[in-house]
Amino acid sequence: MITIENLTSMIKGTLKTLHFFNSDCKEINIKDVYLLNEDTLCCDFYPVSENSYDIKFEMAPILGCFNSFFRNNQYENINLKNYAIRAYDEDDIEILYALSSKAKAELIGKGGSIEWLTTVFFQENTADFRLGQAKQIISEIENGLREIVKIKLKDKFGNEWWETGIDNKTARDVKKIYLNNFGVDCTNGDILIDYTFIYQVKDIILSNYELFKSYFHSSSQFESLMDDFNKLRRGEAHNRSISNMDLENLRSLHEDLLADILLDLKSFQSLFLTENWKRKIKKIMIEGRPEAIHNETEISNEADVIQKLLNIQENLSSRISYLNDTITKLKSVVAPIHKNSVHSELISCFEKDLILWKTLLNETLTLDNEKISTIVNQIKSHEQQMDEFSAKFLLNEK
């Protein structure tokens, strides 16, 4: 019988030589091929390309190779449900992760590479992806601050807020920028605010800090945050490489600067992050739970007590793997600030469910029916709560 270890070695060798037999395929620099979570075949590799789109296409022949080995389920001891691919840069940092069901991956063998791309769960960390994310976050911070300045100063000074609420130098400099761009004078603050530099926005807020103090811990904290933001912004403005740390720092600044502001700017909440979050979460939730490996009838009819116990444990292990994967997916999704609480609640629901199923798996070894029954009842109760939460989530997040 072919073992999993032998089979993964064969696949690894095939991938390394694939370019000899297919002129359209680049040489694949394989890091490793292995089994993940019992039912997922995973390949780690070093791509030639640097941008996300091209790396995704480098993944296609890898999945095509997987299909050639497992299309007909000819290995009795292996029951694969998913394929995973991890792309790494030269520093061994993961830059792109793809997870595809085995069924969807077969689209590639039928000439459906584009269709396959639309069905895969991707977690990206390439340089172009980080730069795109940085530009989006920076834009939201800048425009969010401009919007709250406009609202607060208009509330205090009325429609002429630009003339009465802004210091003379800033007001004059921004009006000059507008005049140079369009050849006409403008005194409308609702328009001029969009032509301010970020350091001017900072000065406007500090000069009128009493109007904004509810949004920040202190004026010195706000000033420090803006200085940090400006340093990162300069790198993005010149299209310099954005590191993982840079992106994390920008996300932290986005939260620190806008967390409370966005509560007052309902119409200005991060549309990109919100829509991306909704789409990703719904996809994860709607995918649903996997089918049990052994159905209740099969387990009930199994005469061999040991085999029956093994079948039950296999079902439990499968459920635990699914919950682990789901939690990993949920944690990989960036939630917009105003959705942080519901996102955390969703993850907590799955984490509690995971603990209960792991406890049940451990108790099956003790054969203590009373304890097992108690845990089963706890799982039923908790999953009823999860169903109610899911229904509420899917209804509210249309």
Image (tube, grey):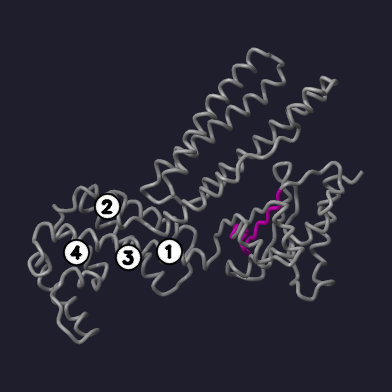
**Residue 278 in the image: x percent, y percent?**
47, 51
Secondary structure beneath dot 4 equals helix
Question: Which tag is nearer the camera, tag 3 or tag 2?
Answer: 2
From the viewer's perspective, is 315 left or right of 271?
Answer: right
Discs 3, 2 touching: Cβ within 8 Å: no
**Residue 253 in the image: x percent, y percent?**
35, 55
Per the rendered image, the range of residues in magenta is 82-95
- At x 24%, y 61%, the residue is 147
Q: Nearer the viewer, residue 244 or 108?
A: 108
Quadrant assignment, res 289: top right
Within-10-Å neighbours for mark 4: few <14, some 14–19, many 20+: some
Q: Distance between the Cα atoms at labels 1 and 2?
A: 20 Å
Within-10-Å neighbours for mark 3: few <14, some 14–19, many 20+: some
**Residue designated by label 3:** 230
Discs 1, 2 touching: Cβ within 8 Å: no
Q: Earlier in the sequence, mark 3 or mark 2?
A: 3
Q: Distance between the Cα atoms at labels 1 and 3?
A: 13 Å
**Residue designated by label 2:** 261
